[in-house]
Image: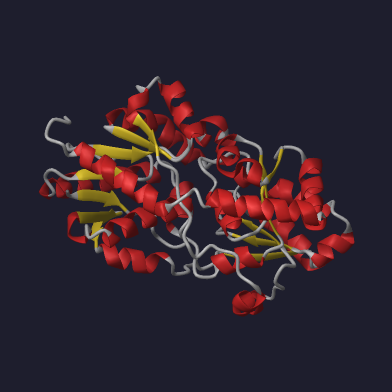
Amino acid sequence: MKVILNVESIVPPVTGIGRYTSEILAGLLARGHGAEVHCFSHFNWVDARRVINASGVSAGGNRVRPFLRSVPYAYDLRCVARNAVFKRSARKFTGAVYHEPNYILKPYDGPCVVNCHDLSFLHFPEHHPAERVRYLDRNLEKSLRRADRIITLSDFVRREVIETFSFDPATVITIPLGVDGSFRPQDEDETRIVMERHGLRHGRYVLSVATIEPRKNLHGLLRAFMRLPASLRKEYPLVLCGAAGWRESKVEQSINELAREGSILRLGYIPEADLPLLYAGAAAFAFPSFYEGFGLPPLEAMASGTPVLASATGSILEVVGDAGLLVDPHDDGAITEGLERILTDGALRRSRIDAGIERAGGFSWTTCVDRTVALYREMVKPHHR
């Protein structure tokens, strides 16, 4: 079974799609498929193990993307050139299954599997760069129709894809993400080194892990947090982790102003090795995103034994269920009330911690990779096409 995997998203700083792609690739290697997996990144074929080893490395900002956004159609032209290279060079892998984790298939004549992580560009176009919305408007439906199978990460997105594009339900498969075993409850001694590195106290901060961009509703979280009693903010500062995304300048300005007061700490992009310890050391985890295709951060927080406050919307509701404290992301007052309850109500905290650990146990990367590999095998059956 030969597999072509696009690994362009596994470039630090790695965000959601990159994490997913990295886990799929690592799972394939662990199952002995290393010689059969061919990784394409931008304009080159790259070594799978080198890609995995580089994925957890911290990196500075990507200078190419801002430049592409500033030049009309530069993004589109780059995609055309990259696709031409892929089409010509992929011919040598005859019979391979091509898995595209990032929405838009490149030109390929063999069996294809594509991920549709969400349809936020349709529901919230104002939350994305204009060139991204334009590109997905022109290409997403064509890409999905060309695929033999479409993978979604939640039933919520699966229903959206089927209803929006009138697809045969049999072609759209939900394969949920998993949570790594490194995300587990850890005591103060285990987290001490990371706490000292970032100037934190175990059990004395509210954590949020998200790319700094409009869809994550960090403005709403900041407003809600600042409505908490001053004594509570002092005891439990808000810690923000995540790479800079799109149109983040206003959020950054607000963060900087509040950081001077001492209530908020911006850590930026965090190496993956530190994340489990930051989750485990937090008093609470806040994730009031407007829209998600899955919601991996709250799942990782639950597995870490940290009580979760999250949005009562779509796939987040599907992932977190009643194990978290769910609120309307458009209601700042509800977010404030939820944060105060989760920080001060001992009985509520204990119940959410126990329920979160139990619920997170139902999500496995092993299952995710096994189901994905089974889908690959289905694609290469002689009668499939």
How many marks can you see?
0
In the rendered view, how is the structure colored? secondary structure
Position of 312 compared to 76: left or right?
right
Residue located at (49% from left, 48% from top): 362
Q: Can residue 137 be seen at all in this image of the molecule? A: yes
Position of 351 compared to 359: left or right?
right
Position of 235 compared to 40: left or right?
right
| Residue 289 occupies quadrant | top right
Q: Position of residue 294 (x, y in %)?
A: 51, 43
Q: Is residue 91 above or below residue 122?
A: below
Q: Between residues 127 and 35, which one lies in front from this camera angle?
A: 35
Q: Position of residue 4 (x, y in %)?
A: 23, 49
Q: Is residue 26 above or below residue 131?
A: below
Residue located at (48% from left, 27% from top): 160
Q: Is residue 272 above or below residue 25?
A: below
Residue located at (42% from left, 24% from top): 162
Q: Can residue 104 be seen at all in this image of the molecule? A: no
- Quadrant location, the C terminus: top left
Residue located at (41% from left, 22% from top): 165
Q: Position of residue 120 (x, y in %)?
A: 53, 36
Q: Position of residue 296 (x, y in %)?
A: 53, 50
Q: Is residue 80 above or below residue 283?
A: above
Position of 264 compared to 55: left or right?
right
